[in-house]
Image: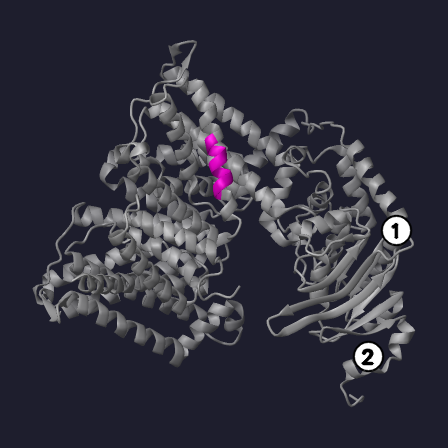
Amino acid sequence: MGIWSIVALGLNVITGYAGQFNLGIGVYMGTGAYTAAMLTTGAGLDVWLALLCALAASAMMGFLTGLPALRVREDSLAVFTIGLVFVFESLLIYLPYFGGPVGIGRIPSVAINGIPLGKEGYLALVLAAVAIIIAATLYLKRAWIGLAWASIRENELATNVIGIHPARFKLYAFTVGATFAGLGGILYAHFIHYVTPYDFGFLPSIYVLVMIVFGGIGTIRGAVFGACFLTLLPELFRFVQDYRNLIYGATLIALILYEPRGVLGDGSYVWRLILAAWRYVRTVFAGVSPAIYDKPAAAVRKEVEQTLTGHLASCAQDSLLQTRDLTRRFGGLIAVNAVNIDVFPQEIFGVIGPNGAGKTTFFNLLSGTTSCTGGKIKFKNHDIHGFSPYRIARLGIGRTFQIVRPFGELSVIDNVLVGLGSRFCTGFVGALGLHNRKSFRDEARAILAQTRLGDYEDEVARNLPLGLLRRLEIARALGLRPDLILLDESFSGLSHNEALSLLDLIHSLREAGMTIILIEHNMQITMKICDRIAVLDRGMKIAEGTPAEIRNNTAVITAYLGSDGHA
Amino acid sequence: MTLNLLAQQLVNAIELGSIYAMIAVGLALVYGVLRILHVAQAGIYSAGAFTGLFLYQKTGSCLVSLLLAMVVAGLIGALIERFIYRPMLTRPRIVALIASIGLLICFSDIFRIVAGPNQLAFDVPSLRGSYDLGGLLISRIDAAILTGTAIIFVLLRTVLQKTKLGFAIRAAAQDIETTEVMGINVARSVSWIFFISSAIAAFGGVMVGILYNAVYPDMGDMIAYKGLALIVIGGFGSLSGTVLASFLLAITETILTTYTAVPLSREGVAMLFLVLLILVRPQGLLGRA
């Protein structure tokens, strides 16, 4: 039970937190178990030393299988991991080195000071391991890394444009999850004393997945409960031995039909009951205040800001963003054709054009979500041509999407915190910092106040109406402390009042020193707020100038009203 | 002689490919519209084989029991969709996957309880013996499988391309909600999809049962796992891609296990091939990038 809890918690990190479907957890469990088995029997290594090696091997396996898995997502990834687990099982059976189908036997018990642990001792050891893994998982969830994982799970592309490298964080998830599962495998090997390839094949992997979904995916309590309950279930039905699997399967279907969030998942019936009971208990006793940790991160932030302002000062005279012959072809279609623009600091620059003119593609090129097929982009004197979105975001370009992409299941403040965090959680160690420190929350609150979202701080993002979501996207981008912000049709679908307040927001951003490029369909708004406007038509820039110039430009009138000039 | 052997292997590979295609096409149909990884298809496949065997023992007619088995399996499939998958469609897709796994466990246990854990023989004398085509031996069951597959695929193609139902299915695969708004009864189309894909799987089950003269509870598992991989490689929901992938897999599997000494089981080789193919073309053979 404890062993399966550990494995389930490992899978919970990969699938529950980072949202990467993995049906092959057995690979990592097996790697841990086999490494431990081979080192303790064949090489005669000390159990504890072997344990460390086996953990490292599992982590390595997680990393190695994570690398190719970056190429595929969702269902493809699920199927890919099914394939992996079969290949792994087959390798264990057919390579003589691994003991063939009978596996490896006579694995020694764990001993402390030369005295082998008895049954009770081993139970204590396993429980201690479970406690450690739970603590580690709890910590991960509260660290930046947990927030980054959640944002990848919700919307990978949006995570990328606010400066978080999804691939890197997925690899972390695979490695961490694999290490946990490997620990489970090691403990299993020393408990049963022999391992066979079939212990870590497809079906055991599936059972682990079933455990976490059954208990409530993405929660620690769910993983532990699922593991315990489903290990016990067959024992419970021992009296109907013959029908055991049938009942197991039927229970599974019935429960998942009745409670798809998992028995103890967020929002499930049982969990709501428990929460209500807990609230009652808390009103009786004193309230529990959340712990606030302190680490010298304000210093890091100051440093980042100093380099940024230094940079700004140095290029204040030059254009902030410059494109030269920027081109993108899709097959025979040229979506963006040799576009040159210069945008200067603190300018509000509009990009307009008829539908299909290549405006959004142009934005995608600037933010790196689409790579250009020709030309150059310079931002703050850096040549950012060919940079990945997350690097461009870190340099200080924030963007919003025409079709909003919030991290739906995260709260409004967490949405902003993800963007904020990407400035700090660069490496694995940085990502282990905690995100609910007061200084970060205060900064996020300041941004929410600026975008007038303060009242919705703890609301789950998917519940917000479109007008607020558009502002949330801006707030999220502001977390990056960008110098340039790209707004993709932020006004579309807004009511008159919402549009007016967005207008104010854009002006206040400029006052604060930011540069804004916006795509807009609404001519009135564009003409009103933009300092300069570029007009795209069929991928080419056909005009550029002040609103007054654009209004009287014949090429623009032709593009919008047709070649005859009358509509 | 070696040439002859190669030809013989090719026939085997094509036959294997037909069997893969039969289960994978059903999975692709289901995936195309509902985006469900329908693992329980393996159970339906075995259900088809068991029903076919039972009916054959009662009636003695191969064709009748085959057709009846297809209908029975089709109904089972449609019922599963109606009562198990349909309430889950608004949920995260992993929920339906778990239910599907639960179903698979139930299926194999039901067969084990009803028919016992051992292999049952499925001996059809009228399909024994073989045709000799210039040294190339094609058994009658091989011929039956190949013809049957051809007929089924031609029929399926006609249904999908020419009939109203096929049109509804193809539209629903693009966007269920819009199709519904256009006044098409999507729920009924989905029931038909399950009926059709289950019937095709049952055909495969009966034929494989006769081919290897063996029917047993988890006979469909491995094929269904491979089928899932095949729909990924085919380019999710693309039927022609799935069929192409099935034959590609069968040929590679046959050649690699016959002519090389890879230290892997047949399934291991197949899975390795599938994994590599997914990595090389994540969007699938005929899928768009």
Is A59 inside the magenta-drawn segment? yes
Q: Position of residue A173 (x, y in %)?
A: 55, 39
The subunit carrying tag 1 is A
Quarter in which the N terminus of chain B is drawn = bottom left
Residue that mark 2 sits on: A556
Neighbourhood count class around disc 1 (C-alpha, 10 Å): few under 14, some 14–19, many 20 upward: some
Q: Position of residue B22 (x, y in %)?
A: 30, 64
Q: Is residue B254 above or below residue A556?
A: above
Nearest to N terminus: mark 2 or mark 1:
1
The one nearer the camera, A252 or A376, is A376
Specify start and end residues of the magenta stretch as a single range: A57-65
Is A94 inside the magenta-drawn segment? no
B211 left or right, relative to B252: left
B41 left or right, relative to A339: left
The subunit carrying tag 2 is A
Q: Position of residue A40 (x, y in %)?
A: 37, 21
Residue at point 9%, 64% (across, down): B128
Report, in whole angstroms, how far the alpha carbon at label 2 lies from the one at label 1.
Answer: 32 Å
The one nearer the camera, A417 or A104, is A104
Q: Position of residue B107 (x, y in %)?
A: 28, 51
Q: Amino acid at mark 1?
A: Cys
B144 left or right, relative to A563: left
Report the disc number at residue A315.
Answer: 1
Residue at point 69%, 74% (across, down): A356
Q: Amino acid at mark 2?
A: Val
